[in-house]
Image (cartoon, helix red, strand yellow):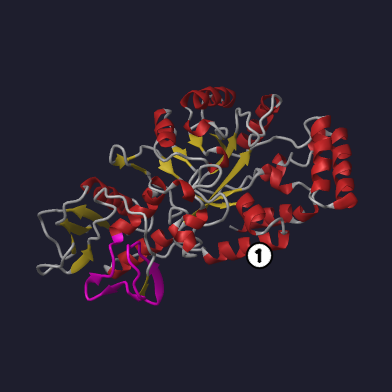
Amino acid sequence: MMNKVNIICTENIKIERLVYIIDFINNHPLKPSDTNFVLNDVQRTNLNILYSKNKEGEMHFFVPAQNYFFTGKPKSIFYANQYIFDENSLYSVENNIKKKTAFYKNGEYGFDIFETIFFHISRYEELYCSEDQLDFHKRMKSSEQLLAKNKVHRIPVVDLLVYYFFKSLELEVKKIRTTYSLSHDIDIIRKYKSTFSSFKSVAKVLQMGLGLSGAYRILKSIVKSGKNPQNDSYFTYDWLFVNSPEFVHKTVYFVAGGDRKYDLFDKDYFKELPEIIKKAKDKSYKIGYHPSYDAYNNRGLFKEEFDKLNRLSGNDIIDIRTHYLRLDLQKTFEIIEQYGFSTDSTLGFADDIGFRCGTGFEYNPYNFAEERAWKFKEIPLVFMDSSLKYNICKDQVDCFKQKAKRFFENNQYGTHIMINFHNSSFDYSLKFNKGLKEFYLQLISEL
C-alpha cells in the first residue's frame, strides 16, 4: 500500500517553487518506494503536514513557512543554524542566528525544511550574490558560500536533511551506501607539444624554486617523451581510463577551442583526439563537452566548439562541464538546454572539495526566469583533484592523500560523489606528484 504524505500549504508563495521541492523529494534516491508526497490533496491522510506561517488546527505535523526564498524577495544575509535529531546535526538556512535546538519535537519542525532545500539546490545565493563575492573568473567564491563559511560543505547537508525528514515521519528509510561517478577533464593532451613548451617547462620549474634537481627531472622527462610520445607525462590514458563498471557515470570531457591564457587548446589537439576518444570509449566512457573559458555564456562560440567536438565523437555528446567551472546560472543553462544536453556537471567548488549544492545526487536545477525545472540533470561535482591539490594542499601529496581518504571515509553512506581527475595531475617529472598515480588507482578500485 502506498503511503501518501499530504503537504497542505496555506501561504501566498510562488507555488511552483514548492512543487519543485516536492518533486525533488519524490525523486530522491533515499525516499522509501512505498511513499509519495503530494500538495494540497483534498483527501486527508494520517500523514498531513501543515506548511504555514502559523500553526492552526489539528494537523499531525507542522513545518513553519519562512516566506523568503519562495516569495521572490531576494535576501542576502543567511545563517546555517544547527539542529539536532537522534544525536545527528542538521542545518537550516535562516535570516537570524539561533541557538542549537531540536530539529523535530511533538510533530513540529524547527525550521522551514522546504525553503532550505530550495536555497541549496537552486543555487539561490549565487543568483543574487554581489560583485565583491565573485572571484577573478566571475565565480562566487567558496569562502562566500553559506555551506563553506559554516564549514559544513564537506557533508551532504541536503541529503542528510531529507533522510532525517523521512525518519521523523516514521517512514521505513534505508541507509544506502554512497554511489560514485568518475570523470576526467582533458584540458591538454600532452605536456611537451613543441621545443618551446619544453623550455617553458624547465623555466617554470626554476621559477617555482625547485632548483637544478627539478630542472634535471624535467629534462629527463623531455628526453623520454622525445624518444616515444607515449611517454609524455600527461599521456596517462592507458591507466587513467578504468574498466570498472561500478560507477554510475564515467565521462571524459574534452575541449574544442579557446585562445585565452586559461585555455590550453592548440592546433594539434584535434589530431590526437580521435585516438584518445577511442581509448575512452573502449572502456565504456561517455564523451562530454568542456566549453572553453569564454564559451560558457557565448552562444556562437559554444556552438562552434560543440559542433566540432560532436562530429569527432560521432554525434553522441550529451554531457557537459564548463572549463574553470565558469557558469551563468541563467544564460549557460539556457544554452545547455537549447542544445539538448542530458547532464551538466559544473556545480562544484573550484578551490575546495565538498557538496556545493548540499547534495551529490543528480537532479534538475531550477530556472528562475520561467519558474520551472530545467530539462537536463545536474550531477554536482563533489571531488576534483586540482581543487584539493593546488588550493588546499599546496602540492603536498601526503596532504592530498590524507584529506582525500578522510573525505571518502566520512561520506560512505547516503549520497553520490562525482569524482574528477585530470590527466595532467600525475606529471611524474614533478616530485610532489610522487605516489599520486598509485593512490588514484587504489582509491578507484576500493570505491
Given residues 140 and 114, the one toward you in this image is: 140
Q: Quadrant of residue 115?
A: bottom left
Q: Residue at x 49, y 65 (%)?
A: 151
Q: In this image, 223 relative to 41: left or right?
A: right
SS at circle 1: helix
Q: Position of residue 308 (x, y in %)?
A: 57, 22
- Kindly identify which residue carries mark 1: 402
Q: Position of residue 176 (x, y in %)?
A: 44, 62
Q: Is residue 395 above or below residue 377?
A: below
User: Does the magenta segment cover residue 57?
Assistant: no
Q: Residue at x 36, y 74 (%)?
A: 84
Q: Residue at x 61, y 40 (%)?
A: 185
Q: Amino acid at mark 1?
A: Gln
Q: Give the residues in magenta.
A: 86-113
Can residue 416 be seen by looking at this rendering?
A: yes
Can residue 172 be seen by looking at this rendering?
A: no
